[in-house]
Amino acid sequence: MTAGNFGYFLPQLARHRVQFVLIGGGAAIAQGLAYTTYDVDIVYSRDQSNLERIVEALKDINLYYRGAPPGLPFRWDVQTLLNGLNFTLISDKGDLDLFGEVAGNGVYDSLHLHVST
């Protein structure tokens, strides 16, 4: 993960009071592991107000599906988040993976309880 990715996404999401849990390489780095990753992975709460905060927090960074052909229509809004679950995205600020659910680990509510205790 580049410092720019980590240094942009986490403060931006926190400023907008987005409920999320950092997972993957970013979580390993936060725990002190000498590790390199190129994206930020989060599990996010899917309640309506949180989806609205995510959209607002990330609206200005030109999000697009990672690996999708150029020109594929993509609208960054609450309805897109409601229609999907997991999103692998590219942006002006780096790559971001938004997970509504992680196989074997669950959803935000169960992960948040685990890391909060």
Image (cartoon, rainbow, N blue to C red):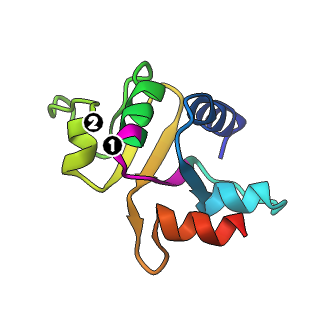
Task: Give the residue at x 58% y 56%.
Answer: 21
Q: Nearer the viewer, mark 1 or mark 2?
A: 1
Pointers 1 and 2 in contact (C-beta within 8 Å):
yes
Q: Residue furthest toward the bottom?
A: 104
Q: Quadrant of residue 9?
A: top right
Residue range (magenta) = 40-49
Locate residue 48 relative to residue 5 in the image: left or right: left
Give yes or no for residue 47 being in the magenta stretch. Answer: yes
Task: Give the residue at x 24% y 52%.
Answer: 84
What percent of the width, then of the height, locates residue 74?
A: 20, 32
The residue type indicated by label 2 comes to Val
Residue 6 can be seen in this image: yes
Residue 68 can be seen in this image: no
What percent of the width, then of the height, locates residue 17?
A: 57, 35
Q: Is residue 44 above or below residue 60?
A: below
Disc 1 target residue? 48
Of labels 1 and 2, earlier in sequence is 1
The crowd level at tag 1 (other Cα within 10 Å; few <14, some 14-19, many 20+) is few
Disc 2 target residue? 78
